[in-house]
Amino acid sequence: MYSLNYKVTTSTCDSEGRLKLYSALQMMQDCSEMWIDSEPGVKQYFAEQNMAQLLASRQVEVIRVPEYKEELTVTSTVYGMKPMFGFRNTFIYDAEGKPCYKTWSMGAFVDKSNGKLKRVDDATIASMTLEPQLEMNYKDRRIILPKEGGTTLDPISVLRADIDYNKHLNNANYIRMAMELLPEDFEVKGLRVEYRVPAKLGDQLIPTIFQIDGGIIISLAIGNEVSAIIEFTV
């Protein structure tokens, strides 16, 4: 397990003084990335093999949105590991230890030199500390796009500020971009995102919006290739 402590500050709040979902996702992402410091053997192996873990999918349950100045704790635990994929829970808890956000995610192990999937050896997998899978409403990581009925909007440019140290559009920024396309009164209670093709600096993401029962699906495409699919539910 790896944990980080946060306070809901001005820069992480929306206009109503509540934690932005984008900011919560950044907290989750930071904790997930730092988790590897709790597994020095895995960290050394990844460094020697020039490997990284890239987020392939995430599901979020919003239990309660924290408010300005609340104290939060983010924890990240790994409950499953295969040669090319890892599975983790990342939860955000309030000062009383009650969950505000429950998430699970799948990461893909890749070779940093070419971005292709790369296997982790059996000895490294066996050395991992696996923890219990936490309770939440687990859904499929795959999001099925409706075959018709979508509305395509103007492209969104990937800017320098959107890029992280993997030279890709940062995972949380896909959500930030997509949320700007939601109706103003849409309150997100659930989120699923499937990352397919990493967007890079200068790419133009073409959004297509689909109305579904209980929510909205937004596809972000680079040309004819889908980069990410985000499902928001109420």
Image: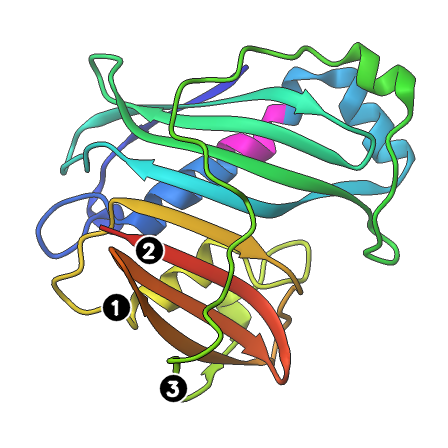
Mark 3 = which residue? 153
Mark 1 = which residue? 182
For the image, the number of numbered tags is 3
- Above or below, comparing residue 119 to residue 91 in the picture: below
Range of the magenta residues? 31-35
Q: Earlier in the sequence, mark 2 or mark 3?
A: 3
Image location of residue 198, percent across then percent down: 65, 64
Q: Nearer the viewer, residue 234 or 47?
A: 234
For disc 3, the neighbor class at 10 Å (few under 14, some 14 to 19, many from 20) is few
Q: Nearer the viewer, residue 13 or 22?
A: 22
Q: Nearer the viewer, residue 183 or 180?
A: 183
Image-quadrant location for residue 208: bottom left
Circle 3 SS class: loop
Image location of residue 15, percent across then percent down: 11, 57
Name the residue rendered at 43%, 49% in the picture.
192
Mark 2 = which residue? 232
Most distant residue in the left direction: 16
Whole-Å distance between the Cαs marked 3 and 1?
Answer: 12 Å
Q: Quadrant of the N terminus?
A: top right
